[in-house]
Amino acid sequence: MAKTSGLGWSVCSVDDASGTPKAIINDVTNLQFATPRATQDITGIDKSAIERLLLLADFSITLNIVADFATGQAHDVFKTVPSTSVARTTTLTVAGKTLANEVLYTDYPLQRSNSGELTASVPGVLADGTVPVWQ
């Protein structure tokens, strides 16, 4: 596969509270996600540089969305975040490569700007201890 831009994004789906995947790609204006690894500093006093061990893997995401109150769209997916405690499969596909994780979304903070936009920045974190892997 050659170098690519984010213009080839083809899937952004998130399960609703009942576990049904919903394609919300049209409501997502931009997103940030990370797949960091924790580290442990194990530097002895005999060293002149830091020594570390790799620890657990993680995943985090923030979906920036336009409020869409149509059935099966972004509002239907996230409106239950404050009242449910369910992991939601979140699937991202770009240029034929897929990253799917079980995610706990921790807030659904709608914002109305002074010019009238109604948006939300929805944060999520890894739910189940499964290492994030691109397929």
Image (cartoon, rainbow, N blue to C red):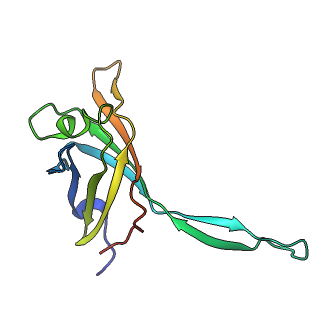
Residue nearest the viewer, comparing 9 with 86: 86
Q: Residue furthest top?
A: 114
Residue nearest the viewer, comparing 10 with 21: 21
* 80 in relation to 134, above or below: above
* 104 in relation to 128, above or below: above
- Identify which residue is drawn at 33% across, 31% down: 82
114 relative position to 20: left or right = right
- Identify which residue is drawn at 75% across, 74% down: 51
Q: Picture coordinates of residue 128 (x, y %)?
A: 39, 59
Q: Picture coordinates of residue 16 (x, y %)?
A: 20, 44
The quarter of the picture where residue 126 lies is: bottom left
Q: Picture coordinates of residue 36 (x, y %)?
A: 51, 63
Task: Point out the image quarter for the N terminus.
Answer: bottom left
Residue nearest the viewer, comparing 109 with 82: 82
The quarter of the picture where residue 37 lies is: bottom right
- Identify which residue is drawn at 33% across, 41% down: 85
Q: Residue furthest bottom?
A: 1
44 relative position to 78: left or right = right
Q: Picture coordinates of residue 33 (x, y %)?
A: 41, 55
* 50 in relation to 125, above or below: below
